């Protein structure tokens, strides 16, 4: 049985690393999230079908409120990623489609364009994966990326996921169908990677 933390406790005691902190997405994050998406719109839009629907700050506020409801209902937990030193918001990472019966979920993430190339997403996702297996009692985590989204595929590779197949035309995004490379990680895979 999975055991997701309460949003309030996760806000008071964020998970993190030397460089990053992960906080639950709240309505108060909407303005920063909007600025991050707006700044990186051309970079994100080819890969994320939700980007065109973020048309103003109020639409991002609705997203942030939906994130809180999803967390409280146990459907998904999503975090803003912040630089520890400056508290600058650099992106989002989360566990989607949490399924208690099967103790599984999907990993999702995005990073604002200026934060690319620093290893932030590998670090943030790695932190969350460790929490998911060690504290939330997940058995399996799935992740997928478009077969031509090489940056995302590189993150998935560095995290140690195993390739499981191609989902043809899995997502309609930016006016075209994207094939997805699908990957999985079991709790035993994660344990085997530890030093």
Image (tube, rainbow, N blue to C red):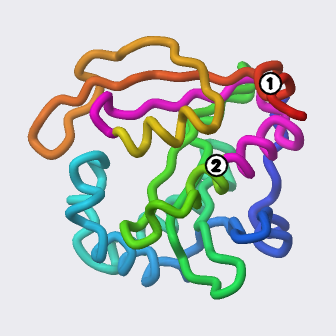
**Rendered location of residue 127, percent (x, y):** 74, 51
Compared to residue 22, the image places residue 104 above or below, namely above
Near-viewer residue (130 or 138): 130
Which span is picked out in magenta?
A: 126-149
Among the two numbered marks 1 and 2 on one chain, the one whose residue lies closer to the N terminus? 2
Q: Was residue 183 drawn as part of the magenta stretch in this picture?
A: no
The label number, if any, that marks residue 62 in the structure image: none
Near-viewer residue (20 or 11): 20
Is 47 displayed left or right of 155 in the figure? Answer: left
**Rendered location of residue 168, percent (x, y):** 27, 16
**Residue 136 appears in which quarter of the rendering?**
top right
Please, what secondary structure does the residue beneath circle 1 have? helix
How far is mark 1 from mark 2, CA to CA? 15 Å
**Rendered location of residue 167, percent (x, y):** 34, 16
Near-viewer residue (180 or 29): 180
- Residue, x 20% and y 34% (percent of image)? 172
Label 1 with label 2: CB-CB less than 8 Å: no
Most extreme residue toward the left is 175
Report the residue marked by disc 2.
125
Report the residue marked by disc 1.
187
């Amino acid at each position: 049985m999975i055991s997701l933390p309460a949003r309030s406790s996760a806000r008071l005691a964020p998970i993190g690393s030397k460089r990053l902190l992960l906080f639950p997405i709240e309505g108060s994050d909407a303005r920063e999230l909007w600025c991050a998406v707006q700044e990186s719109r051309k970079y994100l839009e080819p890969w994320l079908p939700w980007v065109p629907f973020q048309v103003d700050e109020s639409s991002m506020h609705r997203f942030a409120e939906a994130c809180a409801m999803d967390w409280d209902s146990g459907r998904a937990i999503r975090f803003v990623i912040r630089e520890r030193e400056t508290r600058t918001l650099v992106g989002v990472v989360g566990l989607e489609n949490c399924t208690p019966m099967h103790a599984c979920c999907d990993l999702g993430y995005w990073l604002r364009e200026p934060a690319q190339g620093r290893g932030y997403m590998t670090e943030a996702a790695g932190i969350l994966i460790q929490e998911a297996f060690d504290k939330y009692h997940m058995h399996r985590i799935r992740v997928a990326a478009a077969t031509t989204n090489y940056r995302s595929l590189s993150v998935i590779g560095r995290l140690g996921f195993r390739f499981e197949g191609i989902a043809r035309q899995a997502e309609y995004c930016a006016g075209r169908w994207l094939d997805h490379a699908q990957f999985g990680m079991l709790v035993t895979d994660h344990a085997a990677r530890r030093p």
